[in-house]
Image: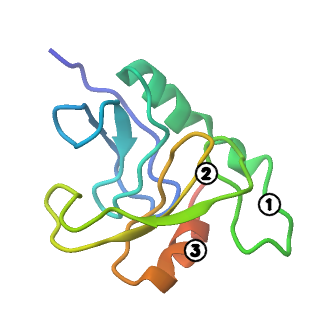
Amino acid sequence: MQQEIALKACPHCGGEATLASPAQWPYLTHIVFCPSCLAKGPQGPDFADAIAQWTLRFGAEHPAEEDAAAKACPYCAWEEVVEGNNGLGNEPGHEGTLYFTACPNCLARGPHVRDKDGTLEAWNRRVGDV
């Protein structure tokens, strides 16, 4: 039985985070994610690793250069991010294609949005003490 764990809020929207196992989403890893904006933390081989990476939040200590289009990854501080889409209906509980900005280093994904042009804005939005 999984015990209740206090997780940091989502760095992008402040939403309450939750855990997802490979049985709950279409990948072979464990994650911490935000049901409000669909941001996902770094993927881990188990919940302990995924929680540790979600909690770390290096991005606050190592922000991207001021003229950078995208802020550094809030989890690992990687400065080069990529834009992508999840494919039609690939996000459980959501219809249609959603777009996101992601960190190729730790595999975290920012908020998922319907407008491809809005991915960087959603990624750059940070709340609280990320």
Q: Nearer the viewer, mark 1 or mark 2?
A: 1
Going from N to C along the chain, the mark reached first, 3 or 1, is 1
SS type, badge 3: helix
Q: Which corner quadrant holds the N terminus?
A: top left
Instruction: Work out which residue is located at the far top of the displayed protein and give it.
Output: 1
Looking at the rendering, which quadrant does residue 7 occupy? top left
Q: Which mark is residue 130?
A: 2
Horizontal side of residue 65 vs 91, given as left or right? right
SS type, badge 1: loop
Residue hosting label 3:
120
SS type, badge 2: loop
Going from N to C along the chain, the mark reached first, 1 or 2, is 1
Q: Residue at x 73, y 75 (%)?
A: 69
Amino acid type, callout 3: Leu
Amino acid type, callout 2: Val
Q: Position of residue 21 (x, y in %)?
A: 25, 31
Q: Position of residue 57 (x, y in %)?
A: 63, 42
Horizontal side of residue 65 vs 74, given as left or right? right
Q: Which mark is residue 64?
A: 1
Looking at the rendering, which quadrant does residue 4 occupy? top left
Q: Is residue 52 above or below residue 38?
A: above
Q: Residue at x 61, y 34 (%)?
A: 56
Mark 3 crowdedness (10 Å alpha carbons): few <14, some 14-19, many ≥20: many
Q: Separation of disc 2 and disc 3 at Cα?
A: 17 Å
Horizontal side of residue 117 vs 60, given as left or right? left
